[in-house]
Every structure is written in structure tokens, then in C-alpha cells.
Image (tube, rainbow, N blue to C red):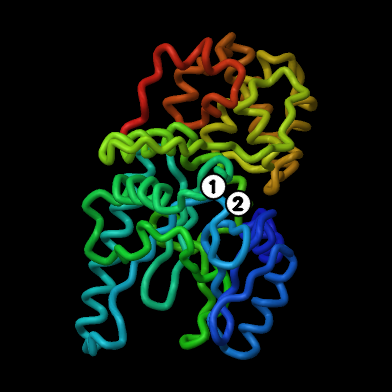
Amino acid sequence: MNDHITKEQFWLEFFGNFGRDFLVEGGRRFTNCPTDILQYIKDCSERKRPAFVSAQPEITQSKPFGIEKVFFDFDYGKKSDNLSQVEIESRKSEMAKEVIDFLKGLSKLNIRPLVVKTNKGYHVYIYFDKVYKIDSKVDFWKEVYGIISFKLLRSHSLYADKNVLRDLVRLCRIPMSVHEASGQECIILNNKLEPDKIRSIEYYRLYGLKQSDLEYAIKQVKSHKKTTSRSQLTICPSNYQSNRKLRPCFQKAIDAHEMCHAQRLALLLEAYCAGYKDPDSMVDIFRYFNDFNESKTHYQVDYFFKNNVNKGQVRPYRCGKIAEKGWCLGESCPLFEKNIQKTLQTKSY
């Protein structure tokens, strides 16, 4: 199992380009310098202190800038529960089944979350495709965030911390930091709760929530409360620019240097129809990925030309199918209104 990026690269991406709070002795410390997280993790490890950072980006201390992801904390219990070892093991088993079931439900929605093992449970992060800036009506956005959280959680609520579900200033344990009590690293897991490779945060953004999910929750809050709020949703600027013939949904994944296996197979069809007519030029596309392997890629591309191109079985995915797979960029794609919006219904939780 080869990691796509290093721990240090992951931590910098996990911090992002906005400000965050660190948990420090006596409270919180705000910083807007991403590289501070590297020294902070080192200091926490040496001093055997918990390494926590704010789950959402912030403007200043405890003041959220926007919504980046939905955070879930599954925990089998507290010290005050005074559980016996038998009770602990029983709860751990029940909790693991609950989390796996939760992850299966997310998979049906084409969502691939970041899952992290903690000392007493699991942290699950479901990223949005972008950071969505919020205005000063924080209570309104807490309700919006809560709608999304509860809808995703559904009945998986026995071991999920309910206090997290509306908390936009929540601190979360930094993935792959060392737990201060157990001395164990909080490793990244797959949907079977087995150790997984280190991937770019862009991977979780690609296969996460979209603007439509946030807009659905906004409508629900306004409808339930009959509010006259004029809170507006703003997409943070992106440096994404397409300079190829590939459709924007594929180009964005390439620019993120991450892509799931199913979309890579679709990319072969997309690239060939976009003008990449020989194996070498197609292999060059995959060089952008973090986990690029020269020999494996040549083998897979050659197999594609032999079994698809030579047999005349090359048809790119329709935009509708791309949307069903969860790869559509939504309204940020220039093709969305023409090819999708008229037929695509609001995604159901």
C-alpha cells in the first residue's frame, strides 16, 4: 500500500489556506500560517499533549470563516462511565458495526469520507467540493450545518456525539497525530475500518458534498423557520482553469492529482474521444496523479486500446451518468445548465 503524499503534505492540506485554532494549554491559539501545524504536531508529540485543530476554517479565534466539511465523532464512552473491560470490548464491536454501516450509506451516495481512528472511536470527515464562505448570521449557518449532519447520520446515532452536529467551531484531533494517552498514531482507515493510504484532501473533495447539498439545507432551514434571512452562499475563488478538451469534471480531478478507480476507467474513454489517440499521450495524462506508476499505467492503457479501441467500443460517459456517479461539478460547470439541470433531481440523502 503506497501513500499518495507524505504526512507533512497531508497536514498542510488538512490545515488549508485559511486560519485555524489550535488547542493549547489554557484554551485556543489562532493562526493563519499553514506551516504552524507541523511545529504544533511536533510539540504535542514531545510533550504528550493532544493535537487538535478547528474542523472549519476561521477568520479569527472561534469565528468561522466558512463550511469546509461535515465532522462526525464516534466514541464508545467517557472515563466517567466506569466501564469494565468486557463492556468496553462490547461497545467497541457495536460501534465499529455502526460506523461501517454509516460508511456504506455514504458510499451509496458516491461519498468517500476521510476516516480516522482515535483512541476511543472514529472521526469521519465528509468534505465539500469547496470551502463555502458564510456571513455573520452564525446561528443560521449552525442550523444549516445541523440539517446536513443529521440527514447524513440518519439512524446511526448510538455512538455519534450529538454535540458535534451543530458546532461550527468544533476542534478535531489531527489525523496521524499521536494520541497523548495511548501513544498510538491516529491512522487513516478505509470504509472497512482497515488501514488506508495517505491521500490528498482533494480526493475527498472530489467525492464529497456539493453546492446543491448545502443549498438544500439552506432551503430546509428557511422553510422550517419561515425566516426572511437574506444569507447568501459564496463559493471561494478557485485557481482551476481548464486548458484541455476534457470536460471540466475530469480536468478538475486531474488538477487535484487524485481520482478514484471508476473515474479513471471513464477517463480513458473521455481522453480517447477528446483526441488522445495513442497510448503514450494517454499515459501522460496519468502522470499528474500522486500515485502514478509507469508500468501499471502502460499496462492498463494498452489493455484499453486492445479491448476497447480495437473493438470499436469507445463511448464517453454522458453528463447524466457522470452526475449519477457523483463526479459532476454542478453549477460551476459550463455544461451543467444545458446537459444536467433540466433532468437531474436534487440528490436525496
Q: Which residue is mark 1?
A: 204
Name the secondary structure under disc 2: helix
Residue at 51 percent across and 12 percent down: it is: 339
> Would you place residue 167 above or below residue 24 in this image?
above
Of residues 4 and 234, the one nearer the viewer is 234
Q: Measured from the top left, where is residue 294 in percent x and y?
A: 75, 42
User: In the drawing, does residue 199 fall left or right of residue 324?
Assistant: right
Residue at 62 percent across and 20 percent down: it is: 270
Name the secondary structure under disc 1: helix
Circles 2 and 1: CB atoms closer than 8 Å:
yes
> Would you place residue 327 above or below residue 345 in this image?
below
Of residues 180 and 92, the one nearer the viewer is 180
Q: Measured from the top left, where is residue 238 in percent x and y?
A: 69, 37
Q: CA distance from mark 2 to mark 1?
A: 5 Å
Identity, as a three-letter code, of the amino acid under mark 1: Tyr
Mark 2 crowd level (few <14, some 14–19, many ≥20, 10 Å Cα): many
User: In the drawing, does residue 292 fall left or right of residue 166?
Assistant: right
User: In the drawing, does residue 343 fall left or right of residue 114?
Assistant: left
Residue at 69 percent across and 61 percent down: it is: 12
> Would you place residue 148 above or below residue 45 in this image?
above
Q: Measured from the top left, where is residue 317 in percent x and y?
A: 52, 18
User: In the drawing, does residue 152 fall left or right of residue 257?
Assistant: left
- Position of the N terminus, as image quadrant, is bottom right
Farthest front residue in view = 228
Rendered image: mark on residue 201: 2
- Position of the C terminus, as image quadrant, is top left
